[in-house]
Image (cartoon, helix red, strand yellow):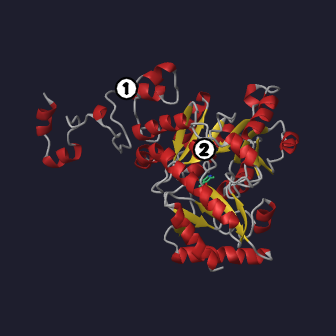
């Protein structure tokens, strides 16, 4: 019996549910853009195919890499995010990439895979507020020790590493102050220490590269073991969806897949698709434009009489300008200092600094056409925010100052608007304070 004949035995109602199981309209080989997929589960032709699929899942071999996967269930793997993962690994010069539902899911996954009770994580003391909260509020409950250090001081790092240290974690540029960590310098220290340890006690260097994006910096090329990203930011670029990714050595592919299978935090194919189709293909174009604008805007702000300081890795006045030039390079090897800046306003007291920062941001929120008050970054639109009370509010105010944040510090993420228009809006706003 043909499937057409078989179908006729069933009610129209039922046929409307099943439709054409093998439609002639499916010809995915000739799509120019990959089709958006949406199938939580996958049809298995036989019990044997199902069993084989479970054998092959998270059991990657040279052979399984060469053939088409046996798809089973979205959380284990599905076309949109699997294709995106191949492209993300390529962008970061890593062996493999495993995506997650958001940046925080990716960060907790890499810690989950690299640590167990009794182990220790060393992290730079300034970082994204939720990562700070994850490390300080949650990991002590799991008996994972966390040391927050000033990783600008490499000698201090050497003396702080203990036999239990398994991970060194940091952002560079750091959210929100834009200061840098010497990725190659840390990788060299860790390499030396690892050479004296058995492999299962090796320390891994994990870099949150969200601020730079792979267009501006590829930590794995500089010696890091893993890179994580919030795809919600510069890689996604258009601000429509959340996502995260861990990129690292082939050896960790299966472990990360198993972790994602059991802990969840999976990236929806509907959210993977825009990153695959819009975000990643336009990353270089967008970031080139944003860097060009950021440079002009940082120079403008630096000269403005009401501005005390501008932290932008592209400015010759940037304290780590030399390091920026060494490690922030685009795919052609050109200097690529990123799309974000952090600036403070002249004031006589911390309170005045905070008041002025807030006034500026509120004025922009009400009046600026090209500057939107919103958290997030790496968007096509220029975004302004006050980290002290927003993205980094998990860090207590007095500690923020110790960690290099100013009470009135303003973070600006440059979009793809014409830079003159952004400057015009800043000029009007600065005139009000
Ligand atoms: C936003 C952000 C994250 C978290 O990513 P989500 O996608 O929001 O979970 C992590 N690190 C940095 C540097 C970020 O800016």
Disc 2: which residue: 216
Q: Looking at the image, which residue is at 40% across and 44% down? A: 277
Tag 1 residue: 49
* Residue 159 sits in quarter: top right
Q: Residue at x 59, y 66 (%)?
A: 384
Q: What residue do we see at 62% from left, 39% from top? A: 218
Q: In front: 75, or 148? A: 148
Mark 1, secondary structure of its residue: helix
Residue 413 visible (yes or no): yes
Most extreme residue toward the top is 63
The quadrant of the rendering that contains the N terminus is top left
Closer to the camera, 165 or 52?
Answer: 165
Image coordinates of residue 231 in percent, x first then y, are: 53, 49
Give coordinates of residue 201: x percent, y percent.
76, 31
Residue 315 vertical placement versus 93 (above, below): below
Name the residue nearer the viewer: 399 or 423.
Answer: 423
């Amino acid at each position: 019996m043909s499937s057409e004949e078989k179908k006729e035995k069933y009610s129209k109602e039922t046929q409307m549910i099943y439709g054409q199981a093998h439609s002639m309209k499916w010809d995915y080989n000739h799509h120019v853009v990959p089709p958006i997929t949406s199938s939580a589960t996958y049809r298995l032709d036989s019990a044997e195919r199902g069993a084989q699929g479970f054998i092959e899942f998270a059991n990657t071999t040279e052979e399984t890499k060469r053939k088409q996967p046996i798809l089973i269930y979205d959380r284990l793997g599905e076309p949109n995010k699997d294709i995106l993962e191949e492209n993300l690994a390529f962008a970061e010069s890593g062996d493999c990439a495993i995506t997650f539902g958001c940046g925080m899911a990716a960060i907790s996954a890499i810690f989950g895979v690299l640590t167990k009770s009794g182990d220790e994580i060393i992290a730079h003391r300034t970082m994204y507020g939720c990562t700070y909260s994850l490390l300080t509020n949650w990991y002590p409950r799991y008996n994972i020790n966390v040391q927050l250090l000033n990783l600008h001081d490499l000698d201090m790092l050497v003396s702080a590493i203990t036999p239990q240290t398994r991970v060194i974690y940091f952002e560079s540029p750091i959210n929100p102050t834009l200061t840098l960590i010497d990725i190659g310098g840390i990788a060299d220290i860790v390499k030396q220490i690892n050479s004296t340890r058995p492999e299962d006690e090796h320390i891994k260097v994990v870099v949150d590269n969200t601020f730079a994006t792979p267009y501006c910096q590829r930590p794995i090329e500089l010696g890091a073991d893993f890179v994580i990203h919030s795809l919600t930011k510069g890689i996604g670029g258009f601000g429509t969806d959340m996502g995260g990714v861990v990129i690292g050595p082939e050896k960790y592919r299966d472990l990360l897949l198993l972790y994602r299978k059991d802990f969840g935090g999976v990236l929806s194919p509907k959210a993977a698709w825009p990153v695959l189709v819009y975000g990643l293909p336009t990353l270089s174009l967008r970031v080139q434009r944003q860097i060009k604008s950021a440079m002009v805007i940082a120079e403008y702000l630096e000269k403005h009489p009401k501005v005390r300081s501008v932290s932008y890795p592209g400015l010759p006045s940037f304290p780590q300008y030399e390091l920026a030039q060494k490690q922030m390079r685009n795919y052609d090897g050109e200097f690529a200092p990123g799309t974000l800046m952090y600036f403070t306003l002249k004031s006589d007291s911390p309170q005045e600094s905070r008041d002025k920062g807030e006034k500026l941001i509120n004025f922009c929120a009400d009046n600026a056409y090209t500057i939107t008050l919103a958290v997030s970054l790496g968007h096509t639109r220029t975004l302004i925010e006050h980290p002290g009370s927003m993205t980094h509010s998990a860090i207590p105010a007095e500690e923020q100052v110790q960690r290099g944040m100013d009470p009135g510090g303003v973070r600006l993420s440059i979009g793809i608007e014409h830079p003159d228009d952004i400057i015009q809006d800043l000029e009007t706003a600065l005139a009000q304070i």
